[in-house]
Image (cartoon, rainbow, N blue to C red):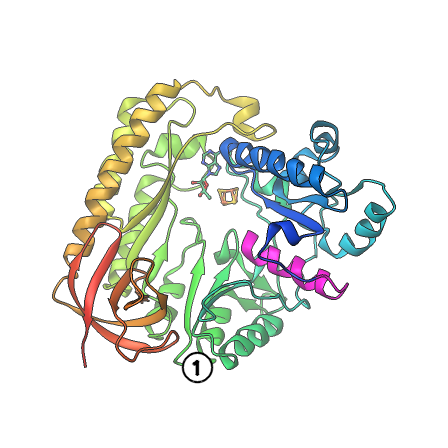
Amino acid sequence: MNVVDSEVVAAILQKQDYQITEEINEASLILVNTCSIRDNAEQRIRARLREFGRIKKENKEVSVGLIGCMAERLKEQLLEEEAVIDLVVGPDAYRELPRLLSQVELGQKGIDTLLSTTETYADIEPVRMDKNKVTSFVSIMRGCNNFCSYCVVPGTRGRERSRDPETIIAEATDLFENGYREVTLLGQNVNSYKWGDMEEGVSFEQLLDRVAGIDPLLRVRFATSHPKDMSDELLKVMAGRPNLCRSIHLPVQSGSSAVLKRMKRKYTREHYMDRVEAIRKYLPDASLSTDIIAGFCGETEEEHKQTLSLMEWAGYDLSFMFKYSERSETFAARKLEDDVPERVKTKRLNEIIELQLKLSLAGKQKDIGKSYEVLAEGTSKKSEEQLYGRTSQNKVVVFPRGLVKPGDYVHVKITDCTSATLLGVLNF
Ligand code: 5AD
Ligand code: SF4
């Protein structure tokens, strides 16, 4: 989401005659788009700010702005704590950047952290910053109304609001016409996308169907789904459109119903399992990925084991795994005790990571000998002679370049794998 937001910010600033540079020493303005989801994300930003401080010392013309969730969460406090910062702008205030920058030019500090109930930047055409010109993100909604007890997002990104579907279709069509072959529709909880009134409105299922209808050669992905809202209807729409990618990201967070209740996730282990079974029924070839938090408030060893057993049952292809990090102002920070010792959190996280490595490898080994349609994205990091791309299941495949160009669809026969990557040969 921050990648898309940075592209929106770049579009706003390009209108003011700013240009993007890849070379930090050339920059007259450094904007750092930030994440507050865990404390270590914020600590990394603080370290970068010290680096920017050194650049600013050498060149007095440079201004530094901090934008995104950390700006929203800490507001004026940032200007007090970090002398290097000239500008603080929250996620709904990017249209104010030109005004704030002219203040900064006059030697003042600029700040705007107002949240909005309507801002979606729908009319702004993002300046694409992706390198490959094949895959891109399209934001379809902003904010979140779920208030999971551990999460800062509803506080930093504000209330949920959906973007006008016509602008989404127009943006995806434009990307396709410019050679892009994959779009990922983004929102904190895409299943609650809703435009207009119940009867004449557009649901997420309808939106997805329309985006997939732009062209069969346009692959469409989406993130993130919430297990409480993941409908059979959505899976049926996906089953009917082969270009809706066979890959579902369904964050579970914990395998214990009691922990899920403390997390205010609004589903149980059994409901989650029911949704995975529905995915397997409608989309038998889909891959499944998830997010997991280790060591949430009050988590017992038994509850942790339930997470491991659910992982094993679901056979995740990929997981994003985190230690619980208490965030101030959340329900958990106010009402629950962050009582799992750091060393226990680390041990549990390591067990989760170890199991996921095993599952990822097993999932890829099953692909050996099979042939997949792969969208070529670019040159492999390891060798100029090889390209990388993805299967519909979102698995990365490395294969010999041959005459293939990024943006081409090719058939690749899988010959080998690691836990992260499939290796293959072109299959004519
Ligand atoms: N501590 C650790 N992980 C968190 N996430 C969200 N909030 C926290 C937190 N306070 C994780 C969740 C979410 C992902 C984006 O980040 O797993 O799905
Ligand atoms: Fe955070 Fe929950 Fe919203 Fe996801 S659904 S952004 S975890 S509050």
Against 70, residue 121 (above or below) is below
Residue type, numbered disc 1: Asp
Residue 89 visible in rendering: no
Q: Is residue 362 left or right of residue 286?
A: left
The segment highlighted magenta reads 1-18
**Is residue 349 inside the magenta stretch?**
no
User: Which quadrant would residue 73 be assigned to in this image?
Assistant: top right
Residue 166 in the image: state x and y as whole percent.
61, 74
Residue nearer the viewer, 198 or 428: 428
Residue 220 visible in rendering: yes
Q: Residue at x 48, y 19 (%)?
A: 337
Residue 113 in the image: state x and y as whole percent.
73, 43
User: Which quadrant would residue 414 be assigned to in this image?
Assistant: bottom left
Q: Is residue 375 left or right of residue 215?
A: left
Residue nearer the viewer, 270 or 13: 13
Against 228, residue 391 (above or below) is below
Residue nearer the viewer, 56 or 199: 56
Q: Residue at x 42, y 69 (%)?
A: 220
Q: Main secondary structure of the magenta part?
A: helix
Residue 33 in the image: state x and y as whole percent.
61, 47
Q: Residue at x 62, y 42 (%)?
A: 69
User: Which quadrant would residue 260 be assigned to in this image?
Assistant: top left
Mark 1 neighbour density, 10 Å: few (under 14) some (14–19) many (20 or more): few
Residue wearing tag 1: 215
Against 27, residue 205 (above or below) is below
Q: Residue furthest right?
A: 106
